[in-house]
Amino acid sequence: MKNTVRISSKRQITIPARVFLELRLEEGDQLTVKRKNNSLVLEKAEAVLDRLENSVELPKKYKGLSLNQVIRRAREEYFTDNP
């Protein structure tokens, strides 16, 4: 099924409600954007992390956390250690 979206003056698009629900997206989800030939491919950032799961070992302190939680904790640690 094809959906048409319009690009706003701020270069934003709205994901059609049906697609949003079918993909189980939620407010605050982070998506990656990739150009493939003459198309854009949007993918949940967590899906990318899942594919890389066995190629990069996650430190024990981050195991069991979502991507957003890992990023938040890593930022907190970085800015606490590097004022």
Image (tube, helix red, strand yellow):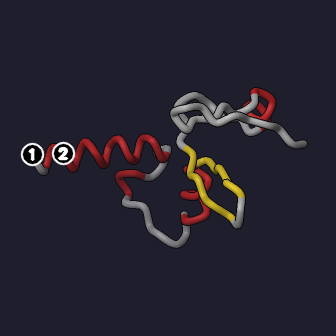
In the rendered image, residue 20, in percent from the top left (x then y), is placed at: 72, 33
Task: Tell which of 21 and 3 is nearer to you.
Answer: 3
Secondary structure under badge 1? loop
Query: Horizontal placement of 20 versus 11: left or right?
Result: right
| Residue matched to label 2 | 79
Q: Is residue 29 above or below residue 60?
A: above
Specify the quadrant that holds the C terminus: top left
Q: Residue furthest bottom?
A: 55
Question: Which residue does the image show at 42% across and 61% down from the upper left?
Answer: 58
Question: Which residue does the image show at 79% across and 37% down from the upper left?
Answer: 4
What's under tag 2, amino acid-wise? Phe
Q: Is residue 44 above or below residue 25?
A: below
Q: CA distance from mark 2 to mark 1?
A: 6 Å
Question: Which residue does the image show at 61% across and 47% down from the upper left?
Answer: 44
| Residue matched to label 1 | 83
Task: Tell which of 4 and 83 is nearer to you.
Answer: 4
